Image: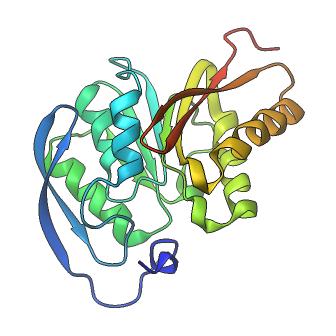
């Protein structure tokens, strides 16, 4: 796969959609994917690993999926917690529209998808799920995480899935140090679990913040 396509706002080439049956939130659902997006053939291995390990989201709240693609995490959040407000953030316009269309087809009226600059400045989150785009490069990845993780509400938590051989074990201490530098004593970063070569990292913001 040419990763440049799914990091592009407007992928090259005409869109070719197709319908897939996938398992999300314990049920089989029909979704659409397309060419030149991330994981067009279904739920990728990292996302699947994360969904097997993380606890179910709370029934309500404000949730975020960083880099939502065609929607496996955002849709799972919406299916688990239909009363929650779920925001998906995606730079690839083709993938973003697929996520919107998939949410609409599943009746998930509280799933919204934004380009990063469109997210309201004051919007904060109780829960973040993400399979972050590691291959975008270290500098861009670090900027992305520092853009969104500080938006956790007090008592909120984030779960990130990162392949072990793509730097999960170095990313964990970097996140901890970067958040400590930005918001001292407010965040705890740990390894929540390991699943088939993937690390699931957990970031928790203290309920008691200055």
Q: Quadrant of the N terminus?
A: bottom left
Please, is residue 145 above or below residue 91 in the view? above
Number of marks drawn: 0
Residue, far bottom? 13
Which colour assignment does the render follow? rainbow
Left/right placement of residue 109 relative to residue 111 reads left
Between 202 and 144, the one lying in front of the other is 202
Please, is residue 101 above or below residue 104 in the view? below
Residue under the image location 73 percent in, 23 percent down: 187
Residue under the image location 36 percent in, 78 percent down: 36
Q: Residue 120's spot in the image, x, y percent?
A: 57, 45
Between 17 and 101, the one lying in front of the other is 17
Please, is residue 56 above or below residue 94 in the view? above
Q: Residue 155's spot in the image, x, y percent?
A: 61, 15
Q: Residue 68's spot in the image, x, y percent?
A: 42, 53
Residue 82 appears in the rendering: no
Left/right placement of residue 77 relative to residue 128 reads left
Residue under the image location 62 percent in, 23 percent down: 153
Q: Image quadrant of residue 93? A: bottom left
Residue under the image location 29 percent in, 53 percent down: 43
Residue 187 appears in the rendering: yes
Q: Residue 210's spot in the image, x, y percent?
A: 83, 14
Please, is residue 35 above or below residue 163 in the view? below
Between 187 and 163, the one lying in front of the other is 163
Q: Image quadrant of residue 133? A: bottom right
């Amino acid at each position: 796969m040419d990763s440049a396509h799914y990091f592009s706002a407007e992928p090259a080439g005409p869109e070719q959609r197709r319908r897939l049956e996938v398992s999300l939130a314990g049920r089989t659902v029909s979704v659409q994917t397309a060419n030149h997006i991330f994981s067009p053939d279904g739920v990728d291995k990292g996302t699947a690993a994360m969904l097997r390990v993380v606890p179910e989201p709370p029934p309500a709240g404000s949730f975020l999926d960083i880099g939502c693609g065609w929607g496996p995490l955002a849709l799972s959040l919406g299916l688990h917690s239909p009363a929650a407000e779920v925001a998906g953030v995606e730079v690839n316009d083709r993938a973003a529209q697929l996520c919107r269309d998939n949410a609409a087809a599943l009746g998930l009226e509280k799933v919204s998808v934004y380009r990063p600059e469109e997210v309201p400045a004051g919007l904060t989150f109780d829960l973040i799920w993400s399979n972050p785009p590691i291959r975008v490069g270290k500098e861009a990845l670090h900027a992305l995480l520092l853009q969104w993780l500080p938006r956790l509400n007090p008592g909120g938590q984030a779960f990130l899935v990162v392949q072990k051989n793509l730097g999960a074990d170095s990313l964990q201490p970097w996140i901890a140090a970067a958040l400590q530098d930005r918001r001292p004593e407010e965040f705890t970063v740990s390894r929540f679990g390991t699943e088939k070569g993937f690390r699931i990292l957990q970031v928790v913001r203290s309920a008691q913040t200055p």
